[in-house]
Amino acid sequence: MAQQLWRLTAFEARTAILNGSLSSKEVVQAALDRIAEVNPAVNALVEVDGEHALAAADRADSALRRGRALGVLHGLPVATKVNSDQAGHPTTDGVVEFRDHVAAEDSPVVANLRKAGAVIVGRTNTPAFSHNWFTDNDLYGATVNPWNRQLTPGGSSGGAAAAIATGMCALAQGNDLGGSVRFPAFACGIVGLRPTVGRIPSHLSKPEPLPPITSQLMAVQGPLARTVADVRAGLEAMAANDSRDALWVPAPLEAPLLPTPVRAAVCPDPFGDAKPEIKDAVTAAGTCLADAGYQVDEVNLPRIREAADLWHRLVPNVDRFGLEEQLRRFGDERARRNYDAHFRYAPQLDAEGILRALQYRISLIRAWQLFLDVYPLVILPVSHEPPFPIAVNQTADTVMQHRMIDSQRSLVATAALGFPSVALPTGLTPHGPVGVQVLSRRFHEDVCLRAAEAIEARVGSLTPVDPA
């Protein structure tokens, strides 16, 4: 039995720890054994800290014996991402030159994981500057997709997603500016939540300037796990207040229940380029919701193309004033090529153009809020294509790069609008996992999660999986 403990969901493991049938040390040791078994084939975790993890598990077991108040992740093995500060560890962001940038303190999201009782077993891989659909860099090498080594595990939280999919930890922390939680969740067949901006506190102690305005408006921290219930627990843990984040909002995690039947808008092909298996996944998710009592209508989504275009007008142009200099100086060839592709794709704006785009954003959000008054839930694709072959990370020409950018427009549109969404798997195809994105209004993550649970109850989970 002990060697199979890594198969437990976070909810199952925590229940066993609290009722005394398992200890945290047993659960954490099982995770470390699983890491030793499969990580060499996947390269999801680039740092493993077994000694400190087992010591933390001992403290968790001692706290339970002494009857102390316990957090929602008490004694569970989790992983953090190398672009987030963790005290005593380098915040490398996958960049060779940053390998000695050792953090003096935990970032808010890492601190909140610890406060919730989590045991950190390791750090997960990311592309250089967390700027690619492929998790590969000159510092740590490539993370591979556990379903198919020829496919990307997604980026930028590809290490986190691959670690979760293979059972190396119960929960992982990622971050998402334009899909970096949701695309890896999609590619690896797990669940990932992009919460509302301001829901989970964030802060990075780096010598560079403050985060660009696009990051302040669109970038979030979020949990990845194998089940929706585990993602819900991760959100609860990560969302605690931290005064270092000036944008954190003390919004309740549970909003008042919506009148039933809840109306759900299903849009299988919002941009007219989704592959058949993607459209089928969205349609199937709508059928699951209808079976669960939702009122499901297939409708067109308001101004979604404009929202995707807005992300591309803002993010690459704002990056010119901060990220570009560092990326060109320290980034690897893959990161520079990906950045150049986005910059060629986007219209070039001067400062006035950026200001006008920011003003324009409000009208799009207003249009969507009015739409969400009618349809409080939206089901749409994650990526419009299955996970990309890793070969194109080295060989893609401009046409292929722009095709990949196009295929991610449902991801960047929701980021530009600032609404929360859950990516969850709905099945497996010859081209890899497929899944859907479940969206609702700001600070209504609970609406997304309830719908995602209804879908998950009917399609099941795909993971854990042994690496291909």
Image (cartoon, helix red, strand yellow):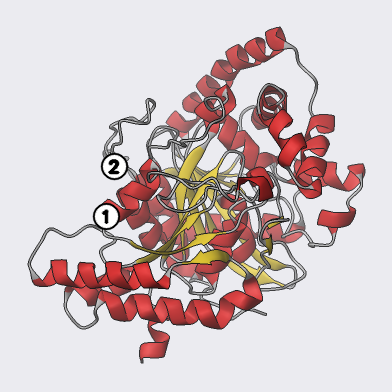
Figure quadrant of residue 129 = top right
Question: Could you tell me residue 113's position as x and y percent?
Answer: 33, 53
Question: Could you tell me residue 274's position as x and y percent?
Answer: 75, 50
Question: In the depicted view, which residue is nearer to us: 290 or 336?
Answer: 336
| Kind of residue sitting beneath label 2 | Ala
Figure quadrant of residue 149 = bottom right
Q: Residues within 10 Å of mark 2 (few under 14, many from 20)?
A: many
- Residue at mark 1 to residue at mark 2: CA–CA distance: 9 Å
Examine the rendering and report whether any part of residue 192 can be seen: yes
- Residue at 59% across, 30% down: 416
Residue 461 - label: none
Question: Could you tell me residue 7's position as x and y percent?
Answer: 43, 79
| Residue under numbered circle 1 | 116
| Kind of residue sitting beneath label 1 | Ala
Mark 1 and mark 2 in contact? Answer it, CB < 8 Å.
Answer: yes
| Residue under numbered circle 2 | 240
Give the SS element for disc 2: loop
Note whether 86 is above or below 277 in the view shown: above
Instruction: Tell me if 131 is positioned left or right of 58 in this view.
Output: right
Question: In the depicted view, which residue is nearer to us: 321 or 86?
Answer: 86
Task: Please identify the residue farthest to the left as the structure is shown.
Answer: 67
Q: Quadrant of the C terminus?
A: bottom right
Give the SS element for disc 1: loop
Question: Could you tell me residue 233's position as x and y percent?
Answer: 32, 56
- Residue at 52% across, 80% down: 36
Instruction: Tell me if 393 is positioned left or right of 447 in this view.
Output: right
Mark sitting earlier along the chain (1/2) = 1
Q: Residues within 10 Å of mark 1 (few under 14, many from 20)?
A: many
